Amino acid sequence: MRSFAHRLGALFISFAIPMMVGASQAAEQPDQPGQQSAVIERGKYLVTAADCAACHTAPGGKAFAGGLPITTPLGTIYSTNITPSADFGIGRYTEQEFVRALRRGIRRDGGHLYPAMPYTSYAKLTDDDAHALYLYFTRAVEPVDAHAPVTDLPFPMNIRASMMAWNLLFLSEKVFAPDPQQSAEWNRGAYLVQGAAHCSTCHTPRGFLMQEEASPAFSGAQVGPWYAPNITSDPVSGIGSWTRDELVAYLRTGRSHGKAQAAGSMAEAVEHSFQYLSDADLDAIATYVKTIPAVHAQANDRSRFAAGTMFSELATLRGRDGISSDNDTNPSGAVLFQGNCASCHAAAGQGSKDGYYPSLFHNSATGAKNAANLIAAILYGVDRTVSGRQAFMPGFGGKPTDANPLSDRDIAKLGTYVLAHYGPGDTIITEQQVSEVRRGGPSSPLLPLARGGLAAGTAVVLLGAALLIFRRRKRYAAKP
């Protein structure tokens, strides 16, 4: 999913920890001619479930040829060409090498992948599914003989060997093992959520070294400019109030009427992946997700799906004294709302009757204490296509062709107005918050800390060498 999008540079700098590169658990297995087509078809389905196209197919580019820029707090990562091109893709990979890259993040040449490719989740895939993926990519995908742009993160994050230490600390190579205490449906859902669909890479908070934190799993995390919300079974902070059918409908369509609409990376997941999964697999995913242990945030006193009510100040803006000339240079939140939002979401924020234009109250984007998704939706808009029907909202953050994009100050005013009347009512958006989302999300302290650590380590080494030289000179000078 682009989501690690977005999920981003979990890099730990170390030059002292070795790692033995062992053989993959999966061996190359010959298939009977009559079986191969079925295995390839399963591989194609798994590729859809894993949403590989979202990252490895650039807009307007050829399928799986890579080149998509993924903005991270540590720099831009470009997705690679994973077509069977011998010179530019994975055409020379043996199955063992392919599986090693899939599960352990190690390329054919021994170089390490960044976890923008969620190999920490793919490590759970079974040998049979890894084999099916290999056959699909090498036998059914059209080779594209073209270089994808090379990822070049700033020093020291460009030292891929640093991932050896991170993998030793945080990568589990255990293949998914079914829980005998649970149903077959639950286990299928757990396998998809934890493995191919890699849901935790977006929805689980990350620690200091950008590793997934196990204890608050699925309790929400920042992913670039968007926030992947709490999807645990907590009825207030999470989605415990959703029925199983509502969750299935949301995965299938990207919309739960009166609750939420998919945007950002989740919209991509719905558009490219979830809408194409079988009913049985969506039911299985919903069954598992509904049992994820609840994680409650103390700041949440009520569900984000129940905040706000209808409200309109349109009457005060009409008439002789309604709008002054100051509105052109310093518009109020009410003026910004009526000028930019009301034509679709209605004057009182109730949306359209069919739900195509969603209500702004009882809406997760406006009801959450964290305003990141509201800001991102205003800046970047929403665009997803499901079953041939597009759900579209333009972004108001500005493009080169826009004459009058909304400024950070305007968006802060507009967002605060929306939250005051259609959301929790006690959240204020600042220009600094808007600027941060416009830049692509919060920056990571890892880069300056890594550089500082290297500088300190180098200073210690130099100081030690100087002391050693000084002592030796002093010893020789003392000899007769």
Image (cartoon, helix red, strand yellow):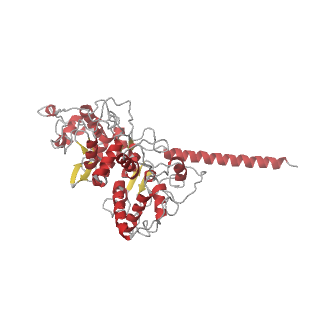
Farthest residue toward the right? 480
Count of marks, rendered view: 0
Farthest residue toward the left? 319
Is 80 or 476 nearer to us in this picture? 80
Is 445 or 362 nearer to us in this picture? 362
302 is higher (above) or lower (below) than 3: above
Q: Position of residue 304 (x, y in %)?
A: 29, 35
Q: Position of residue 82 (x, y in %)?
A: 40, 63
Residue located at (30% from left, 33% from top):
303
Q: Position of residue 248 (x, y in %)?
A: 28, 46
Is 308 or 120 nearer to us in this picture? 120
Q: Tell me, yes or no, if residue 396 can be seen here.
A: no
Is 357 or 186 nearer to us in this picture? 186
Q: Tell me, yes or no, if residue 59 can be seen here.
A: yes
Q: Position of residue 285 (x, y in %)?
A: 33, 47
Describe residue 334's horizontal placement relative to residue 453 as left or right. Answer: left
